[in-house]
Amino acid sequence: MDLTATVWTLLPPIIAIALALITKEVYSSLLIGILTGALLFSGFHPLHALETTFTVMGDKLGGNINICIFLVLLGILVSLVTKSGASRAYGEWAVRKIKSRRGASFATSFLGMFIFVDDYFNCLTVGTVMRPVTDKYRISRAKLAYIIDATAAPVCIIAPISSWAAAVGSSLPEGSSMDGFSLFLRTIPFNLYALLTLAFLIFLMAADFDFGPMKKYESAHNGDDLSHMEQTHVVGGAGKVLDLILPIAVLIVLCIGGMLYTGGIMDGVGIVDAFANCDSSTSLVLGSFTTLIFTFLLYLPRKILTFGQFCESFTEGFKAMVPAIMILTLAWTLSGVCSGDYLNIGGYVQSVVGGDSVVHMLMPAIFFLVALGLAFATGTSWGTFGILIPIAVAVFGDSPSNMLVMTVAACLAGAVCGDHVSPISDTTILASAGAQCNHIDHVSTQMPYALMIAVICFVGYLVGGLTGSGYIALAIGAALLVVLALFLTAKNKKASS
């Protein structure tokens, strides 16, 4: 019995999502979804299903091997910069230069925005480096954890040179004519949650007041003695601030150079065409590997690290990226099993909603809510958009239309939002660890902030879908954020008077 391009093709992602919501465990949920799809395709022949599963997995890993290599190289680079002590040097500089609470908050967020290459690196480094500065100005650990969390994933998801960009770019279904990296770039202006969260954070730091549970926590813990808190992540080495800035700056420049090179700039192709035609995954590998060579030459002659410490970073960086690679591998495989070569979920979804303009208009808001709920339940945004982006492509077809770009942006925004408020999210846990804040305190104090932005995003995507314009969605979101800021300011003045 042929079940391809039928309602049964929806079963694998539905099972994966349902199990993830129930078990809060993403690896087994994705694997069971994959095996379900393979059984449907094979006519419930177990051996054929296993063969299909590992054939798809091998093909997907082979096709995306440069993404995996880039993640490993990035993990190594993160480990090297951490070992060097360069981030510690930034903290020491901040202690000397900062003179106010606002200055301490902005210095913390600036460091978080600068370390955009990976959210794990961001959370642990920023917390460890900036704790002495924020403690000095009586910024509570919960507020520090919020600043860290609000500048980790939201920055990474709009940074073209990051582990997140690589993951998003590899989430398109097999055989897609679109370039995943180009699609990611187009989603940046419409990723409302990331952009509005950063804007809201800047407002809170500039206004220097809080509300809700955060305000109560700030008042209750203003006089705490924090001297008993233990270090959870020690940053050693003799590096300077320049040893933090240079490797990241070189990584950006070399990755951009790699894109121009693979796009044919050496053959006389124009810059715009070179970016459009580049092999983004190969470019990221070239840029990150060359940056490692640069970092070797920067650190070892000056004895920032020993040769042994440099080599230790290879295994440490690889181990740090294993969970990310595992999630991507399973998400890629589920996407492959559901692709046109196997179950053809795209053919079925397109036949059902392809001609319904009303459903199309609601898709950005719907995908935002689904992504938010899934990421909240599972604690992973990568697994979330790995499941949902291929479905969005199936709905809107294999061309980068305005509605597809906005819907993919909504997937990414919802995934980051759900990850942000989830108590089991890696980045939420690491933000608590980096700030040395009680984890439940961090979750409970930041949730009202995140959910307010989520409501604004939902309204923005709803209006954007109805009008067919991502820029209108962004304008609505920005206008609502201004209204919220004015309301909170007025309320704070009334409470203070």
Image (cartoon, rainbow, N blue to C red):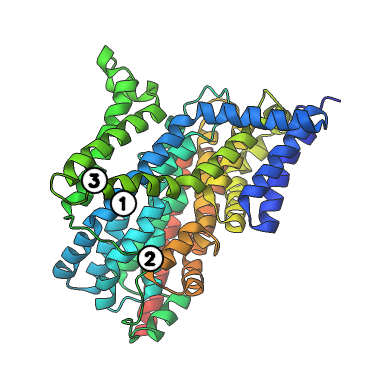
Identify the mark nearer the N-term, 3 or 1: 1
Towards the viewer: 239 or 21: 239
Q: Nearer the viewer, mark 3 or mark 2?
A: 3
| Residue for badge 2 | 434
Q: Residues within 10 Å of mark 1 (few under 14, many from 20)?
A: many
Q: Amino acid at mark 3?
A: Phe
Whether label 3 touches label 2, CB < 8 Å: no
Q: Which mark is residue 43?
A: none
How far, Cα to Cα, is label 1 from label 2?
A: 14 Å
Q: Residues within 10 Å of mark 2 (few under 14, many from 20)?
A: many
- In the rendered structure, the answer to whether residue 80 lies left or right of residue 374 reads left
Say which residue appears at 52% left-offset and 27% top-offset. 62
Q: Which mark is residue 307?
A: 3
- Where's the C terminus, which quadrant? bottom left
Residue 311 position in % (x across, y down): 31, 45
Q: Nearer the viewer, mark 1 or mark 2?
A: 2
SS at badge 3: helix
- Vertical order, 390 against 157 (above or below): above
Say which residue appears at 62% left-offset and 58% top-offset. 377
Identify the image quadrant of residue 437: bottom left
Whether label 1 touches label 2, CB < 8 Å: no
- Where's the N terminus, which quadrant? top right
- Can residue 460 be seen at all in this image of the molecule? no
Identify the mark nearer the N-term, 1 or 2: 1
How far, Cα to Cα, is label 3 from label 2?
A: 28 Å
Say which residue appears at 25% left-offset and 58% top-offset. 87
Residue 196 position in % (x across, y down): 41, 55
| Residue for badge 1 | 115
SS at badge 2: helix
Q: Amino acid at mark 2?
A: Gly
